[in-house]
Structure formats: structure tokens, C-alpha cells
Image (cartoon, coloured by chain):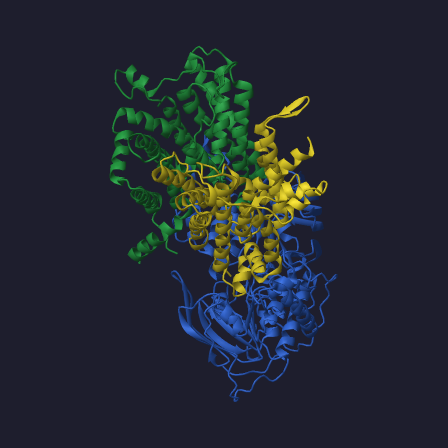
Chain colours: A blue, B yellow, C green
Amino acid sequence: MTATDSVAGRHAAPETASVAPAIELRGISKAFGPVQANKDISMTVPRGTIHGIVGENGAGKSTLMSILYGFYRPDAGQILIGGRDAGITDSQSAIRAGIGMVFQHFKLVPNMTVLENVILGAEDSALLAPSLSRARGELRRLAEEYELQVDPDAVVETLSVGHQQRVEILKALYRHADILILDEPTGVLTPAEAEHLFRILRGLREQGKTIIVITHKLREVMEITDNVSVMRRGEMVATVRTADTSPEQLAELMVGRKVLLRVDKAPARPGAPVLEVVRLEMVDRTGVTRLRGVDLTVRAGEIVGIAGVSGNGQTQLMEILGGYAEPGARVTGAVRMNGADLPLTRTDAAARRRAGIGNIPEDRQVEGLIMDFSCWENTVFGHHRDPEYQSGPLMDNDRVRQRAERLIAQFDVRPANCHLAARNFSGGNQQKIVVAREIEEKPALLLVGQPTRGVDIGAIEFIHRRLIEMRDAGAAILLVSVELDEIMGLSDRIVVMFDGRIMGERQPDQTSAAELGMLMAGVEGGGIPPAQGQPRAHPDARPDLAKGIL
Amino acid sequence: MDYATVLQILDSALRLMTPLLLACLAGLFSERSGIFDIGLEGKMLIAAFAAGAAGALTGSVWLGLGAAVLASLALAAIHGMTAITFRGNQLISGVAINFLASGLTVLLGQSWFGLGGRTPALEGGARFATITLPGAEALRGVPVVGPLYAEVLSGHTLPVYVALALVPATWWLLYRTRFGLRLRAVGDNPASVDTAGVSVVRLRWAAVAITGVLCGLAGAYLAAGLSAGFVKEMTAGRGYIALAALIFANWMPWRALGATFLFGLMEAVANRYPEIDLGPVTIPSMFMSALPYILTVIILAGFIGRATPPRAGGEPYVKER
Amino acid sequence: MTRLPRWADLILTPLISLALAFAISAVVILAIGQDPWAALKTMVTGAVGSSYGWGYTLYYATNFIFTGLAVAVAAHAGLFNIGAEGQATLGGLGVALVCLALPWPHWALALPAAMLGGALFGAAWALIPAWLQAKRGSHVVITTIMFNFIAAALLNWVLVNVLRPPGSQDPATANFPAGTHLPTLSDMAGAIGVQWGKATPANVSFLIAIAACLLVWLLIWRTPLGYEIRAFGKSERAARYAGISPVRITVVAMLISGALAGLMAVNNVMGEAGRLVLNNVEGAGFIGIAVALMGRNHPLGIFLAALLFGFLYQGGAELALFSNIPRELITVIQALVILFTGALDNMVRMPLERLFGRRAG
């Protein structure tokens, strides 16, 4: 590992200097039961750099960083901070060693103020008053220095996600962190918020802080990091200078083989409109407007993809279409299926299924499956009242089991044992069970949410192929995904959602990730954005590469 | 109803409020730390028994109090073990603790004293002595306020004043100290405390221990203050009323005082007037005794105010990313 | 994490929990200077050593089967119904009203009507907590506790002010008409010429309890409604996705639960007492919690656990008669069973999982 030039062209610590690296990990291993999450991992991060850690879901990135933060104890290995064994045994000692961490799911107390959250665990004395007044001054200073403005007296749950993230960063800085770890920091941010975050991170680097960013978005890695480490199946497979690598190379390192996940498909032959959504509005139980007049049409034989940062109304739209809108929400507008109005006020997912709407939900573990039910019981979930599975007042379990055996064979679910509980299958095989169930009912309209989230590459290809087959057989498919490349690869038309609105519609072959990104950020018209002082070839320019990973 | 009657009822309400207030504050500490406790009843019961037994055997109220606190702490430790160490179901644990106390008190009481589950009557130094507040006699003559001070506020036993003092003390601890900040945080989002390098386990054990001590005091007051000795099932649902008061109070100390005083007052009125004659209708005593429970259900239903329990309440803490 | 084999999960863990509960109880008996072995012998002889003992054991077990099933049905829907006590109290009122309403000519006519009355009243008492949970999010545990107290006060008022016969000082109803007297198991044995359980209260309700076990098993594992109850109990969000209405399942599961608890009154109020008295449930609603936990919410397990607690109850009564150990010993055992099977489940499970993990690995 060598010190590097940063993207911005700033010289980092020279490799000849005797300055110890900020972080050095030696031979870290960690197992959770039979799962080896980290295998003999060594890594060095020079002081004053931004270091990316990339890898697929489940590659062990978050585990490694949680070990560095003392949240988990490694089974073996050593952690050196500034060249010395920091003796990190718990989060307390990691904090003392100058490490701060911003978790993917923020660790804030929602009904406390920003100030209280910042001093929690770092109080000066048994009484709060002195700590609170000191923190107030300190926050003012940090806000000016790093663009980290946030109202210290605001209650955290009233803040936007972007501001909550700032509170997390402030928490770390208040504890004098020299090393800041961020786990998937942009997952919930709009592109504009992400840009602001990157400015903050660059500012921190200028002050000599060392930053580690865990992500699976290669675009961000290329934009912000100085060096990048790649993890695969619990192992560290490479550490390279960002300037010396390309998204294609990183993608290949991540999955361990040449990635060319181009989705082969014939041009769509759209038929009559199956789903029509007209001026759909939704105000949730707490009074927040989630949908602001959505208009949408999906025809037979086409896939319409909805692009957008998660949390911009996609979930609510899919729930309304699926017939299970949040209780207490107010929904207006119209949803028509083959020209007939579907009721909006009376939520009834079972009736939607009878009307021919299939639904692959965004979160299979929380919605699509009952994890403690056996595989065969899950294969009729949602269809369990269909007459074909009943005999008299009872359920015809033999028939359900026979059908489950058939589906398992057909969709290559492994292990091929329909009596196992759903939680004993891997993510990809769980998803196959859901996809099998929903496709098998031959719906006229298929709602698909995040079909490949947390699914291994092999299963991704399989699921994508099935969706294309469905389309070619004449089904109308509405796809929601936060993976822009999945949207661009599968869709015949793309609409972009932002803040509960449809920002625009594009043809996949006549748009770019950059243009969609502008729409996703809420920029009307979505013209080609000006290059922002980054002369290098932007990975966005080649969206057909490394699909599902960028 | 004349002024003297009002004073008598208020005086009685204050006494009946005390075990409720102590148990309610006990529950407040536990639930604010994220551990539901429907075992307040059991802890109070076993503490009352311990106070009665130790008081009868030693003749000292202080040894009785010590035994009460220890007995209550023992049951609190079981709850801590299930809720914190073994991440079990806190509601079921509470139910078990209530039955354990209900069974053990009679089993031990019968075999030690042979009085059908009661302990011998406590007298003299085995009971809490009444305390006359300074100037009570001198001020008695002052109209309206004087008798209120002398009759209602003065002349109670130590636990009554301790319970009252615990209200501002709990408020101060909760909102003005490091311990309080962490306690509130651990009940709402334990991960925030854990990632800040503070032990969730230790905080919750501390809260459970405080709950044990306060329930111990409440039980001791029942056996050696309010009554003179332990009687089978003497808590008579007070642990549940305290729980109701805690919900009524929305888990806040000052409101806990208000809620328990209200419930104490209702009990005092019901004791004084078994049947309240309102002309056309007579309110039966059973209605008065059920009123705290009915009120709690109405509060829980959200028709008056809204009860928002600590968010992490009842959930065992498991580390996750 | 290693998972236990199914048989170990279903059989071994409850048995170990039970053994722990008995062991600690034995220590308690020793601590009060009694002989646990002698105590056990007294209990066994008293509860199952004669047909007389069995007659009582089965009578108690019948109560516990109903309340155990009540707790279990709610538990499958993810609801902890602590209110079986209150629901059974109201069930008693329903049964009493039916029995006193008409001069019933024959028990075979009175029984279905009384069952309906008990089930309806029990279900009605569960309805408000259920509705509040479903619609207002009020925690069913707290509301059902409150409803137990309210039920006790209500029954007290009804018995004192409404149903007490003129001139009686006793807070109880008049005796039920002769046409409501249920045949005891002893009568039924006598009808086929067998001398069994003379003067014991076990009655035809025991057979109804067994039928209830079968019906609950069918309901939970063989009907679409049972499928929905179990699915909702595992994940509310998944249930909504699948078109299962949380409000409907919460209310329906609690209604069934309350009805089962209310049915208990056919046994104790109609079959045994022949009139409605104060506190007639005697904690059976709470024992249902222990029974359901120990029986792993499965009707067969509940049947066996109810028999066990019937044995403990009758044995405990004998113990109180023939030794210096009060019957509250049973409350202690009940508490320990609840503690070990319900709350300290992980304590029992963890070493077992390690053991099985080592064997498998």
C-alpha cells in the first residue's frame, strides 16, 4: 500500500515519511456461528486520506468496520492506530483512540435534542448543565468550520435524514475523532445532499482527518476516495489507488469474475394499457404528503421502471397499488386496472390479487415471506384463500405441498426442501420463492420492488430473465429499484420519482444515468448536467457495464 | 361535607397514595430504561412480607425495611436476569414474579408463623413512627392553611415524606444529570448508548436495582406504616394501579405524583363513603374500586391525552449494525 | 446460531424447565423444614392414586384446558392475553344467566345454551381490549389486566345488587334448577356399570374440553383463518401485504380466546358449583398462561400441561390437608413453570443448543 495522490490532486503523506499510518489492521478474523464474516484481513489507511471500502452486500465491510469501532470483538487480529496497538476492546476504547463511526442506521435518540444526542456518553461530569453549554459552543465552531449547520435545540426526529447524518458526524467530531468511518452514507440521501456530504468530507480531510467510507456505489468511490479496498466474501482482495483504477476493474474485483450483466431482451411490443394511475395523492397518518398527483400508465407487454432515491414515494405508491396502503392514510385520485376503477379507500390486498395483480414486495423478509413458516406454506402466502387450495372449510395442504415441490424444481430453489423454514434459505433463494409464487399466478400486472436487493449475482440474472419472460408473455410490469443500472437495463420506459411526483419520463436508450440523477434530485427538465470540475471519464457514461453494482 | 371531613379524606389520600407513588416511581425507572415491569405487585408483596416477618422477629422497623429491600431486590434480580441477561419475555417474567411472591409469602409465612399467611402484629419500634412537622402545633390555629398543614401534611411516617421528596429528586435525576440522560436514551434507543461507548447492560441493571429498592420501600410501608403487619395478598392490586398511574403519568415524575394522588384520593373517598348517593343514582363502592382501572383503559385508548411509552420498552437489546 | 432439533424444542425444553421448577420447589420445601419426597408421595397418592383423586384432577384439568387454549389462540396471533381470568369470570355470568333464565327440562338442552352464554360473555369481555389494540394501539396486556379487575368489581356488584336472592346474605346467585345439572364422569361411568370417582366434580365438560382441543388444532393448523392468525402473529407487515386485515385478525383471535375462556364456566359454574359465587375462577385464567407456555401453544401440549396442573392442584389440596405445606406451594410451582418456560426460555435453550451444536459439528 502506498500513499497516493488524491482525486483533487493534493499530495497526501509521502510514502517515504516515517509517519505511521492512521490505521493498520493485521489479520482480523471474525465468525458469527458458522458464517466467517471476516477472514484474515489486513489493511492500511494513511493519515489524511479518504479510503473507500467496496464490496457486495454481505462481503463483510460493515463487520470489519464495526470491529474497528469496537462494536464487535474480532476472533483474531490486531488493530493499530497511529502505529500503536490501540487496545480496542469496546466502543469506549475506540472512541478514546479517536475513532468515530456513522452507522448506516443512525444511532440517535429520536425524541431528544441535537445537543443531548451529541453529549450522550461524552458528558464532562455527573451534572449535565456544564456539558450542554460547552457542547453548544463547540457545535457552533464545528458548524462554521465544516458546513455542519444544524439547530442544536431541534428534536432529532423532526430533522431531515441529511441533517440527522450531520448530527452523527458532529457526535464523532465532538469526541475529537481523528478517524471517521461512514457506513453507506449516501444510501438515503438525495444527490444534492450527497454532494454536500462530500464537501464536508473533503473539508475534514483538509484538516488532516482520516476518513473511511463503506459503500457499494462505485461512482461515489471514484468521486471521493484516495484509495479503495475491495472485499469479497469476507476477504480483502485488493487495495488500490483510486486514480489507478476504473469502475469496471473494481466491479470485477468485487464479484470475482468478468461482469457483463447486460440484460438481453427483444424490443417491447406494448399492448393495451393495463394499469392507469391518475392524479394519485396520498397523505400519511402523520399528515405528511407522500404522493403529489402521480400519473402513470403501464401497458401489457412492457416494463416501466421507476427510478428514484428511496423514500420519495415509491413505497407508498406500490403499497396503494398492492392494496395495502398504510392504515389511516388519505388517498385520492384513481387507479384503473383494464379500465375498471380499483377502490382506494378500502384497502384489500387479497382483492387485488384476485383482480390479477402480482406483487414482489420491496422487503421479502419483512413483507414477502413469513420467515418462520415453511417454504411450502409461503408458496401460497396471499393466495391462501384461493378456492383451489381449499377442501371444504379446511386448507388442502397436500395440494399446496405438491405445488411447492414443483415450484422449487422449476425455479431451482436450493436446498430443494419445501419443509424448511423460509429463514433457512439464503437471500437469493428466499427471493426466488417470492418470485415463483407471484409469477406462478400469471398476473396481468406485476408489481416489482427491489427485486435483487441482497441477492447474489447468479440469482440476479435468473430473476431478471424471468421478468423479461413475463413481459414477453404479455404481462404489464411496474418495477421500482434504487439500483439505477437495474432500472436502465430492464425497463422499456423509465419514470423518475422525486418527492412524491413523477419528474419525467425517458427512454432507456435515449438517456443517461447523469440525466436521471438530475431528475432524481428534483431538478426539473433534467438536462445534461454540467461536468463539475471532474475531467476524468465518469462511470455514469457507461451504464451498461457492471449492472446492478454501481 | 365540612372542612374537617375534607381534611380527613386528604390525610387518608396522602397515606394511600404513598405505596402507589413509590411503586409508580419504581416502575418509572425500570420502564424508562426500556424494561417493562408488570411485577411491581410481586416485589411490593414480598417486601411487605419481609418487613412484616423481620419486624416481628427483631422488633426493629429498620431491619424490617432492610429485609424488605433485600427481598424486593432478589425478585428484581430475577427480572433483570430474564430481561437483560437472557433476553427473555419481560411481560411473562413479570407475571411469574407476581405469582412467585404470592405463593412464597404464604408458604413461608405459614411455615414460620402458622397464622394462615399473616405475620404477627407489629407494634412500637417495629413500625414507622409518625413525624410531626416543625411548627405543626403552632400553626394549627391559622385559618384554612393551619389545619391543612397540621392535619394533612404533618403527622405521617417517614416513607410518606420520602416518597414526596422522591418526585423532585427523580425529575432532577432524569433531566439534569448524566445518569438520567443515559437512562432516557437507553429506553428509547439502546443502540445510541451502546455506540457511544456506554454499557446498556449496566444502565439497565442500575435501573432494575432502583426499581427493586423503591418497591422494597413501598412494601415496607404497607406492612409497617399503613398497617401493622403483613396480611396475605395485602398489596391487593396496588402494583397494577401503580402501573396504571405510570401510564396515566406518561412516564413523567411530576405527573406520577398527580396520578397516584388521584388514585389515592379515589380510594380514600371509597373507604369513607362506600355508597355515594347522588340523589337519583347511587354510585356503588365496586365502581369506585374499579375506577382507576377504567380510567387507565380510557387513557390507553387515547381518548384523553396520549400515552407514549419508551420506544425500546419490552425489547431485549441485541447488538446489530 | 445452532437451532435445536424439533423434538428437543417441543419436548426437551419444557421438560427441563419443569424439572428445574420442581427442583427449586423441592428446595423451598426443604427450606421450610418439610420432606419434598414425602410431599410428592402425598400429592401423587392424592391426585392420581385413586379414582376419587382422578375425579378432581380431571375437573381442574378441564378448567385449565379451556384457559390454556384461550391463551394459546391469542398467542398464535402474537397477543398476550392475561385477561382469561376476567373473561372466565364473565363467562360464569353468562352461564348463570342462561341457567337461571328458564326452568330447563334437561341438561342436554341447557348445556348448549349455557355454552353459548359463557362463550358469548367471555368473548364480549375480550372484545373491548381487542378493539382498542386493533384500532387504537392500546397494549392488550395492560388492558386485559385492567379488565380482570373491572370484571371482578362488576361480578361483585351484579351478585350483591342484582342476582342475590331476596333474604340471602351470601353474594351468590340462587341454585340453578335441577334440569341444568350436568352428568359427572362418575355418573357416566355408573351408567355403563363401572364404579368410578364417586362424589367428584369431573363432568361432561371434560369431553367438551377435549373436543375444544381438537377444534383449536384444526382451526390453527388446517383452516385459512388459522393460517392468517399464525401469519399475523409472526409479522403484521407481511400479513398486510398478503391481504390479511390486522384489525380483523386481532379482534377475531381475541374473540375466540375470550370465548374459550368463557366456556370454562360450563365446568366450574354449571358442572360443579351449580350457582355463581364470587371469585369462582380461582386463578384458573392465570394458570392458563403457564399451561399454554408449557404446552408450547399446541393443543396436545396444552392437554398434557393441563393434566399436570390438574394433578398439582388436586395434589396441593391433599398436601394442605395432610401436611403443613399450604396449597400456595402450587402457586410457587406455577410461577416457576411460567418463569422457566416463558421468560427464561433462553437460559434453558442456550446450553442445549451448545450441546446439540457440538454433537452436530
Residue C45 percent location from the top left of the image: 25, 31
- For the C terminus of chain A, give its image quadrant: bottom right
Residue B15 vs residue A18, the one in the foreground: B15
Q: Is residue C265 visible?
A: yes
Residue C1 percent location from the top left of the image: 39, 56
Residue C112 vs residue B53, the one in the foreground: B53
Q: Furthest-front residue in view?
A: B138
For residue C307, above or below residue A170: above
Residue B192 vs residue B174, the one in the foreground: B174
Q: Is residue C137 visible?
A: no
Quarter of the image where one finds residue A336:
top right
Q: Count of labels shown?
A: 0
Residue A476 percent location from the top left of the image: 60, 48
Q: Furthest-right residue in view?
A: A525
For residue A390, above or below residue C164: below
Quarter of the image where one finds residue A327:
top right
**Rendered residue at 65%/37% (across/down):** B7
Residue C322 percent location from the top left of the image: 28, 31
* Residue C214 falls left or right of residue A509: left
